[in-house]
Amino acid sequence: MMLIREFELRCMQAYQDKKIGGFCHVYIGQEAVAVGCVAAVEKRDPIVTAYRDHGHALARGMDPRHCMAEMFGRVTGCAKGKGGSMHMFDRANNLFGGHGIVGAQIPLGVGLAFGTKYEDEVISGGKSSRVTLAFLGDGALNQGSVHEAMNLAGLFDLPIIMICENNGYSMGTHIVRGTTMGHDISSKASAYGMEGIAIDGMDVLETYWAMRDVVDRVRSTSRPVFVDMRCYRYKGHSMSDPRKYRTREEEEAYERDDPIGRLRAHLEGRGLTEDDFKGIQREVRATVRAAVDWSDQSPVPPMSDLYRDVYVERWGPYTGSSAPEMLGGGENETSFKAIRPVDGEGELL
């Protein structure tokens, strides 16, 4: 959690220094959600999330250098500088984004759950054994695609946990002003035959233990679950948000209940010393500073990259595609070839 907090603070500084372009949504205050949820699943379990995604990427194990380089739009980023803040991908760790369209990741999450179940049960002839985590914000609850996806998840008995990171505000609109049953959004799950529960997302230990029970249940039953993960973001919806829709007193009340502070108090009761805590701080700050320096020194994508990663393989003016540096950078190939008949023989297009 401290790594995510420090990373996001540095992102805010870099954004103000114009090293980061476009939208930037920081995760400060919600760190316990990503850390607790990711700790409750296995590496083989797929994860997909929305655009406030830096924390999920780091919690899943992405190297902070590649994460920061993507923020900076550099070729050494996880998406070779082409995705930016909202599109963190890490195939090696089964993190399938980072998606900028509100709610669009939930149908993808349902597809991932369908894919793992089909592979486990139909292709391998065994039992469904993987669980998909699909994160969304409370503002996405009113998107039609989310409800279509929930319907399919319930209908097909898919092993997916939809985690609504309910920080109370859909951008600048309080949830009770824009969403029915805003005081109890887990009740929406019952319409789709799904179990719905609420978890305190400001406590990483409670999040972990509650999510571990849910993950075990979904893994054994292959039934979807909807989680109302109650949390709070300390900063604005994005870097351009002045937060005039809520009071400073409200923010201070939540900041006094900081998830990092909660965990620190818990660990101090079990022997953590002030020196121990400061040592972790120094290590985290050094790691993030190194990530910033490394990203600063990394090259920007050349203009020729406009023709790169459009198609998997070479076609016309397009130069094929390759994996990002963090995955080895090797050339990609498809498992099939597009051909056209030429004098009765096939020719690669």
Image (spheres, grey):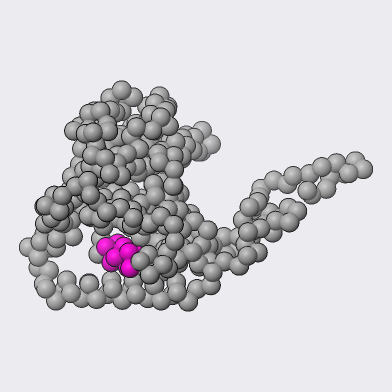
Pick the front one: 256 or 157: 256
Rendered view: 213 above or below 260: above
Rendered view: 273 above or below 181: below
Q: Is residue 113 visible?
A: no
Give the residue furthest to the left. 269
Pick the front one: 271 or 24: 24
Task: Report whether 36 appears left or right of 52.
Answer: left
Residue 231 horizontal/vertical position (percent):
21, 47
In the picture, residue 63 is in which quadrant? bottom left
Q: Residue at 30% across / 55% down in the picture?
A: 27
Q: Which residues are magenta?
A: 4-13
Q: Main secondary structure of the magenta part?
A: helix
Q: Residue at 53% across / 58% down in the picture?
A: 82
Asked whether residue 334 is drawn in magenta, I would say no
Residue 313 horizontal/vertical position (percent):
68, 54
Q: How many marks?
A: 0
Residue 177 horizontal/vertical position (percent):
23, 33
Give the residue furthest to the right. 343
Q: Residue at 49% across / 35% down in the picture?
A: 118
Pick the front one: 216 or 210: 210
Q: Residue at 78% across / 44% down in the picture?
A: 339
Pick the quarter of the image with the N terminus.
Answer: bottom left
In the picture, residue 54 is in which quadrant? bottom left
Q: Is residue 23 visible?
A: yes
Pick the front one: 160 or 227: 227
Residue 69 horizontal/vertical position (percent):
45, 67
In the picture, residue 331 is in which quadrant? bottom right
